[in-house]
Amino acid sequence: MKTVNIYTDGACAGNQSEENIGGWGCVLEFMGREKELCGGEINTTNNRMELTALAEALSALKESGLELHVFSDSSYLVNCFRYGWYRGWQRNGWKNSKKQPVENRELWERILGLLEGNSASFYLVKGHQSLREGGPDANRAAYARFLRHNGEGTSYERFAQIVEYNNRCDALANVFINENR
């Protein structure tokens, strides 16, 4: 099975205000090649941008039957798939545990459709971290936190790459925001 690593991030300047600007960015990594995508929306939310980043990454895939490794700093996104929240939402007619409509339903449904036929694992990455500035103790702590959230099996070198990709996605997410301020 072919493996594709997908790194995503979303951002929103003025989140929860009436006039905000959101951006999303993603990087797809496959067999040593990378593809970067980014975009955004006016009057949106951070969560919408996090979901849009993944939806756009999945839309860029040329085939199915892939093993996908999705890396995101969005607990909202990662936990939905790790804990199967979407299954309960679907069972309950897209209502959450408070019996209210699930926000961003159309994006969740789009993502679920795009994931069909693929195997996906989701990994939570702490956003906005720099391994260059933290020093050895802080870096070890960040690595230990990553392993606690995602399980053992990731080398420190791979962790450092994941952090760099997450930072790149953050920069991509801010392209639309900076162009539209």
Image (cartoon, rainbow, N blue to C red):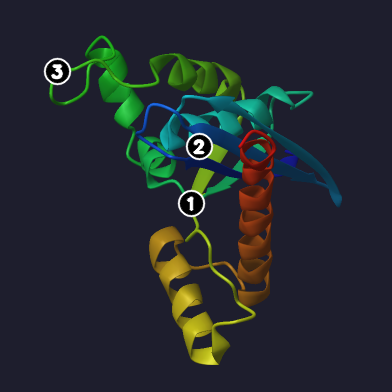
Q: Pointer 1 and pointer 3: residues touching (CB < 8 Å)?
A: no
Q: Is residue 142 above or below residue 51?
A: below
Residue highlighted by disc 1: 73
Residue 87, image x, y percentages: 32, 23
As drawn, the label of residue 45 is: none
The Cα atoms of the two marked residues, 2 and 3, are separated by 23 Å
Is there any visible trace of residue 83 in the rendered image? yes
Judged from this view, the residue extending furthest toward the top is: 93
Residue highlighted by disc 2: 50
The Cα atoms of the two marked residues, 1 and 3, are separated by 27 Å
Pick the residue in front: 136 or 173: 173
x 23%, y 16%: residue: 95
Q: Is residue 100 left or right of residue 102?
A: left
The Cα atoms of the two marked residues, 2 and 1, are separated by 9 Å
Judged from this view, the residue extending furthest toward the left is: 98
Q: Is residue 92 above or below residue 14?
A: above
x 29%, y 20%: residue: 102
Q: Residues within 10 Å of mark 2 (few under 14, many from 20)?
A: many
x 79%, y 24%: residue: 62
Q: Earlier in the sequence, mark 2 or mark 3?
A: 2
Q: Pointer 2 and pointer 1: residues touching (CB < 8 Å)?
A: no
Q: Is residue 100 left or right of residue 154?
A: left
Residue 1, image x, y percentages: 73, 38
Q: Earlier in the sequence, mark 2 or mark 1?
A: 2
Residue highlighted by disc 3: 99
Q: Pointer 2 and pointer 3: residues touching (CB < 8 Å)?
A: no
Q: Residues within 10 Å of mark 3 (few under 14, many from 20)?
A: few
x 45%, y 14%: residue: 106
* Mark 3, secondary structure of its residue: loop
Residue 153, image x, y percentages: 55, 67
Q: Amino acid at mark 3?
A: Lys
Is there any visible trace of residue 6 in the rendered image? no
